[in-house]
Amino acid sequence: MPETSKRGRPGPRRVLTEDQILDAALTLLDTGGANAASIRGIAAQVGVAPNAVYTYFPDKAAVVKALVERLLGDVDHGVFADRDQPWRQRVESLALELRTRLSAHPGAVPLMIGGPMDGPSALTLNERLLELLADAGLHPADAVRAAYLLIVYVFGSVALEVADQHQPGPLLPESERVDTRVRAYAATPAEQYPRTAAAATEMAGYISTEQYLWGLRRVLDGITTSTAAYADNASA
Amino acid sequence: MPETSKRGRPGPRRVLTEDQILDAALTLLDTGGANAASIRGIAAQVGVAPNAVYTYFPDKAAVVKALVERLLGDVDHGVFADRDQPWRQRVESLALELRTRLSAHPGAVPLMIGGPMDGPSALTLNERLLELLADAGLHPADAVRAAYLLIVYVFGSVALEVADQHQPGPLLPESERVDTRVRAYAATPAEQYPRTAAAATEMAGYISTEQYLWGLRRVLDGITTSTAAYADNASA
DNA sequence: ACCTGAACACCGTTCAAGT
DNA sequence: ACCTGAACACCGTTCAAGT
């Protein structure tokens, strides 16, 4: 909340906005990885002294929290809001949208899962997911557990995917992503790890989004078979 | 590998071992959280100058890597090795063992998922999991995908659980763990997040291990219903 | 070969100014 | 009220010694 003038005289002028600071943090994150978003780096990026940042945020944790809040707030709720769509389709849309948003800023992912996601955007997302699962016919108790399972799967997948990339910077193109894992598997001695080594050839044509959706569908299958969920969709 | 004497004269003596350094790192991690394992802190802990650590490890990343390797190496393979047990039971045993090991050092969890898990212990674990799923009757291609799904679930669960705890130090006792989430949910305004707020009362008696096993079983259900896995176990 | 002191280039954060 | 320079207590890492 910028609040350009709150009372009396505004002082020698507020030369920045919170959003500019978050923009700078995101830029540093995108180019230098999770550790690049330093207070001093941000300050340099926006052209103020390091301690000027403390006029806008009480400490670095608050900057990170606000950044996470903004990123989660950017999630497009429209793609899974249509209640005429089959519920599994809606969950897949949500999961893909979330993954796309998170993958856009890999450097921010460790910051997200580094602390509790309890901001308004996270709560809203949780609320929408509970609504979706209620639409699916799940009892409230099941919906709560299922929602958490889905959150774990989505964030866990993205976190491991980001972790498997050694360098900072943008995530590799789709075609090379699972390849990181394949290469690691292929490099293992086949005598000691026969199945892992064999998996490398097995996974030759894999695409990371396919693996992501395969796992998501298994999770949805599990939820469907063990709850009162309306099984509106064949599994692929 | 300590290698007390490799050739000629050993120099003015090797006053430490790699293991002592890792012990010190773990101690700091356990008491001060993920950021407490600094090279300088470790050096102080073991009583040497900071740069002495660089005789044993090339840089901090190598220390972290060795620590992760050791923690994953501590996983007891015996608990899921028995091939006479139903395969789902064996997966549950593995998942619980892994969770116990990881939860024992919450400060190390961000370090684990902060980089690729491609050490010998991680590969061995992967190999054992592939064997287990082969025993279950899965085709190799399915086994590879299912193994990755299970890895994502286990590490994602532990990572989010650790993240939900604000303070460093040991993980809260079992009875208070999901409570952290319950409290966050209960604090939300019911008008804006009715389902999330209702979930708080729904989850009143939840135990974190129960939620963990519930999710794991849904994942196993999903794997069973969509592959050639031998369905040897009723779902709970 | 191993350890040390000293230094360099960083951090986050605080404090006493200046406007 | 907002920004600054200076400082404090930290980092990881390197380098030139000493033994």
Image (cartoon, coloured by chain):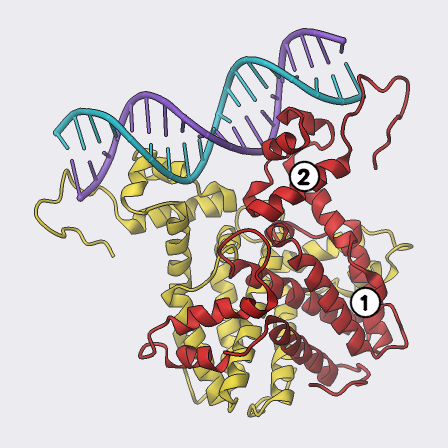
Chain colours: A yellow, B red, C cyan, D purple
- Please, which residue is most extreme toward the left here? A8
Q: Which chain carries label 2?
A: B
Who is closer to the viewer here, A82 or B173? B173
Q: Which of marks 1 and 2 is in front?
A: 2
Q: Which chain carries label 1?
A: B
How far apart marks 1 and 2 lie (CA) works out to 34 Å
The N terminus of chain B: image quadrant: top right
Q: How crowded is mark 2: few (under 14 residues within 10 Å), some or many (20 or more)?
A: some
- Circle 1: element type: helix
- Residue at the location (77% across, 26% down)? B15
Q: In which quarter of the image is residue B221?
A: bottom right
Horizontal side of A47 relative to D19 (left or right) equals left
Q: Is residue B6 above or below residue B148?
A: above
**Which badge, 1 or 2, comes first in the chain's sequence?**
2
User: Residue B166: x and y, percent?
Assistant: 48, 56
Horizontal side of B121 relative to B151 (left or right) equals right
User: Residue A86: x and y, percent?
Assistant: 51, 88
The C terminus of chain B: image quadrant: bottom right
Whether residue A75 is visible, yes or no, is no
- Circle 2: element type: helix
The circle drawn on residue B130 is: 1
Q: Is residue A21 above or below residue B78?
A: above
The circle drawn on residue B24 is: 2
- Residue at the location (32% across, 77% down)? B192
User: Residue B95: x and y, percent?
Assistant: 72, 68
